Image (cartoon, grey):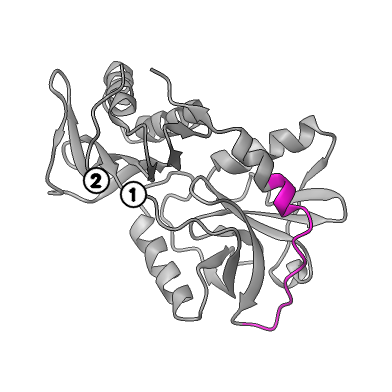
Amino acid sequence: MTPPAIAEGLLAWNPGSGLTRGLAADTRLLAADSWLLREGTMRGHDRHRERFFRACADCGAPPLGQLTEFWRDMTMALPRTGTWFPRVELVRGSLQLRLLLRHAPELRPSIRVWAAGQPDPRTAPRRKGPDLDALGRVRQRAAGQGAEEAILIAPSGIVLEGASSSVLWWEDDTLCMPSPQLPILPGVTSALIQEQARRTGVRVAHRERTLQELEGREVWLVNALHGIRPVVQWSGRPLEAGEALRAPEWRKWLDTVLEPLPG
């Protein structure tokens, strides 16, 4: 059954009554997850569910049965037409589950990145949600430098990830990414790309690099909203961006893994 169209806004979930129009009384997030929803299709539905469930479990969340009911009701409520950027949330206090329905912003095929190297402000780097406000402030500072994103670095200067993106780059024919032992968010889109690389015989490697060591390389910032965005300009320091030779083909492939929502 196709669900009725729902307007942009916040919906709170309660056992038995399901999703109802809610007020943003508490915006302090314990856990969150979001993705691109295009004409009723998305990438990695099950992966986003599993990541959100794990994040909730880390917070002493509602029991698995309630999480499963929430996810079912949330999925049925998602619009099947238009382009959206929904976010599921677990908030502090009452541990309430919510769905924030948002129209997707303009999707961009490339990105300008502030290369000053920002110290990691996160308190829970492996869990999406608690640090979204702090990361938003990092992106605001990047915007003041004419960029859409900023790179977070470890105290050693090693690249971690973007404020809202995973970082991948190419060294010759090897697709590289930071070590999973570093404090980084397990990215759903990054994982999909790495699995496709292995399926097609592309070498994948975890490497530790500074921003300076990424100069001249094809660097991608990837997330569930924009997919793959090659870096076309570094701002804040004299770094030269590498030519985006592989990105167009991989962006086309990523569009092929959009799947209809279940139910």
Name the spot of residue 131 as percent of width and height, x first.
Answer: 38, 55
Quadrant location, the N terminus: top left
For label 2, the SS is loop
Q: In which quarter of the image is residue 73?
A: top left
Q: Which of 146 and 125 is in front in this view?
A: 146
Tell me what residue is drawn at x 55 percent, y 43 percent: 187
Instruction: Tell me the amino acid under the disc marked 1.
Output: His
Task: Please indicate whether residue 254 sits to the left or right of residue 165 in the image.
Answer: right
Observer-nearest of 255 and 125: 255
166 or 38: which is nearer to us?
Answer: 38
Q: Position of residue 146 (x, y in %)?
A: 51, 79
Numbered disc 1: secondary structure: loop
Q: Distance between the residues labelled 2 and 1?
A: 7 Å
Residue at 83% of width from left, 40% of height from top? 202
The residue identified by callout 1 is: 103
Q: What is the span of residues highlighted in magenta in the rendered image?
A: 237-250
Whether residue 124 appears in magenta in the rendering, the answer is: no
Quadrant hosting residue 196? top right
Q: In this view, does 109 lie above or below 19?
A: below
In the rendered image, residue 242 lying in the magenta stretch gets the answer yes
Q: Is the magenta stretch mostly helix, strand or loop?
A: loop
